[in-house]
Amino acid sequence: MENGRAQFPFPYQPYDIQEQFMQALYKTLDQGKVGIFESPTGTGKSLSLICGALSWLTDHEEKSRQKTAALLHEGEASLSTSTAPSSAPSSSAEPDWITDFVHKKAERDLVSKLKSCEDEEAFKLLQLSKEEETEAQGDQEDEELIIAEYESDDESKTRSRFCGAEDDTDDELVEEHVNKIYYCSRTHSQLAQFVHEVQKSPFSKDISLVTLGSRQNLCINEEVRRLGSIQRINDCCMEMQKNKREKPHHKEGAKRKRGPAKPVCPYNKASALQQMRDSVLGTVHDIEQMLKLGRETHSCPYYATRLAVPPAQLVVLPYQMLLHEATRRAAGVQLKGQVVIIDEAHNLSDTLSSIHSAELTGAQLCRAHSQLTQYADRYKSRLKAKNLMYIKQILFVIEGLVRVLGGKVGQNPQSQTTQTGTELHSINNFLFKAQIDNINLFKLQRYFEKSMISRKLVGFVEKYAGSGVSLHTPSSSNKENRRTEGLNRYLQTLQSTQINAPVSPADQQGSEAEKVLSASPMMQVEVFFMALTNSNTDGRVLAHRQGTLSESSVKFLLLNPAVHFAEVLKQCRAVIIAGGTMQPVSDFKQELLFSAGVGEERITEFSCGHVIPPENILPLVLCSGPSGQELDFTFQNRDSPRMMDETGRILSNICNVVPGGVVCFFPSYEYSRRIVSHWEASGALTRLANKKKIFQEPKKANQVEQVLSEFSRCIQRCAVDAGGLTGALLFSVVGGKMSEGINFSDDLGRCVVMVGMPYPNIKSPELQEKMSYLDKHLPHSGGRSPGQALIENLCMKAVNQSIGRAIRHRGDYSSIVMCDRRYSRPATLSKLPTWIKSRTSTHTTFGPAFAALRKFFLEKQRQV
């Protein structure tokens, strides 16, 4: 078949829609297009992606091998023809000009290598002489905190490979990347689920797969893992790698310097890493299996997986690692000519905006300024003039940012009052207002990257203010601590307001020190500086004054996510954007693809229905309740006692006829709290509890699993021994912890109730600016402005995610009740997933809707 395949390897007989999905996917990859694929959860989307994409990769590699073999055959034939008549005495099969070229190239390479070695040796000798000079000037233990001499790219290109580079691997030795597919999703649990699907697929024995993650997810060094925060784990790991590379400079017999030996990681040894890399590529592992393998082989999974990227055919990684250029580069991800699959992509635009936005509080700015000032004062005699110049520029910019918030550096930010208010600026206007428009932020950004000043400052803070792998409280008699006394005093002033969680007196001192002194905010400053280098039209800066400088903040908002997605689309051979619900696709294409320069001819779309029979789903729109009260949950009406009472009556009726679990979604946490409090006072909550045990979505993410387990156990118990209860009722929130990624399959979710429409806060300055940007840069369509369409789309995307929690497989069945007359509008109904929209019925009165609901479940119970 042209651009296609007759059959696909599959672990079982695929559904028709799965075959259609794989055919469309294969064709999209073969033609090098951008595909938007929609396949509801429960239709085997992951397996369709795996078998369709890996079938194409297998065929593509085979075609490449055949093409290479044909070219080689032609070349050999041509050479044999041209050399046959020759009677040259040379024993070589190549012509003289080829032999001559090879010899000359070898000579040039040798000379270049020798010259390189001379340069490197000279540079090392220069560094040694500098270190000997500085030994007399200060304590040798501080050498790790000194910034290497920095020269910007335009000042020196010849010496950059020797200056401060983390990776000293020669470019010529970098392993070439094979043809591969990068698969990314939102969470590590979704990635693990995908890897398990690969393990069950027909490709599990033949594919080389590697899963990438952060150090926080892949580190097996327990001392480092105990540090908790990802920033501290990264810093400690990098410091250990640096300690490993450093060579001792003292002469034999010389007195050893005081202080403990610098720690190195026992899991980062070349032979062990190579062994683990081979094991990872040989068998498909998920992250848990890699951690186990790492402990068994005594090798680091984080570095072993990065070694495995070039030869891997399928690389599985989180969103952020692929969509953020600097992170992508650090992970060794190369997109040129490769295939990218972005799954769970319904929030891709928001994800891009979030990844590339940045925020700094007044407290962080003052803290960064104080730390950097004292760092510069301590080491000014040992820092090169160029380093001091850049440090002064960073301090100047920080002062400007604090000035915008109405404060001053050098004073306690908690005691500085500011005039409450919010201001939005374009990037250029913000730079003018902060009086930093004369600073070259692009050079500062390169300085941050090359000098690693943020990391040095973290080491400085940890060394002189406690914190580290083992918490260390410095002695006040020590001369170094006297020099950083101001830093210690300043950090202590922050303790009282930064630590809010109650702790036992025994743990208080240690925990507060851990939280306050954990890391320098300079890394956040670096991210914010980088954000300010965006194009003036692509972002805005929000200055938010909260009454005190400490609580005030500056925030960069990315308005045009397409600018960062454009590089991915440009480099890749093909990009697949997949999800269970991708509606509304037209706005998605406009904001993210057309704005990134992708033409309509390069975009393909595929959408399929659900595998469940039509009679297994009952979507209802309720326009009024049992007493005839119109359901209009607008901001003005939803708090009325009549509306809350009517909602309670609707739920009570639903719980009377729906067996098992009912999941009720409210538009916000605040509204959920208010309506439940009203029901407690009116007695409605007690009446509901007589039918189903009531659960509420927890505020803390680490409690979600426990609530779900109890919810599930309650439903299972009720199915065996009712005891007056028919199941359980779960109160959840749209966009909350249970509206995405949680499966309420079978009896866990026989009915999903949507209370109102979860429109975002239109008064939010960020949202207003986004609407204004879209109205200015995108075309109007259908009588609605792009800004108005954004509000509607954000609402319906959230609704679609929530109502998609119930139907999870072919034999599942569920009802969906949307309580608000506004759902009946044609424009709103059109934004529901096709498989739900085609089966939705609208009811102006409650009676017929309730009769349909009761009939639906009576029929299902008869079939059991």
Image: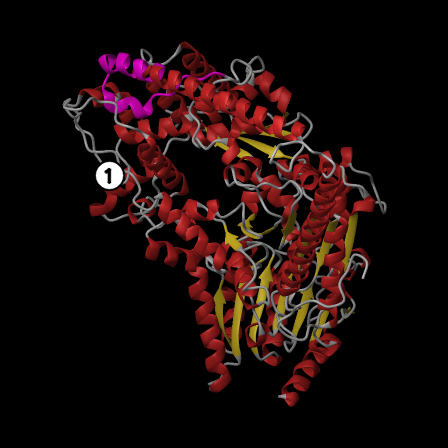
* 710 sits to left or right of 860: left
Residue 549, by quadrant, is top left
Classify the position of the N terminus by image quarter: bottom right
Instruction: Indicate whether residue 144 is drawn in magenta.
Output: yes
**Residue at image coords 46%, 15%:** 390
Over which residues does the magenta segment extend?
126-151
Which of the pair 503/276 is nearer the observer? 276
Which of the pair 480/138 is nearer the observer? 138
In the rendered view, tell whether residue 545 sits above or below residue 763. Answer: above
* Numbered disc 1: secondary structure: loop
Residue 274 is situated, as x and y percent measured from the top left of the image, at: 41, 48
Q: Residues within 10 Å of mark 1 (few under 14, many from 20)?
A: some
Residue 606 is situated, as x and y percent measured from the top left of the image, at: 76, 58
Q: Amino acid at mark 1?
A: Leu
The residue that disc 1 covers is: 471
> How is this picture coloured?
secondary structure
User: Can see residue 642?
Assistant: no
Q: Which secondary structure dominates the residues rendered in magenta?
A: helix
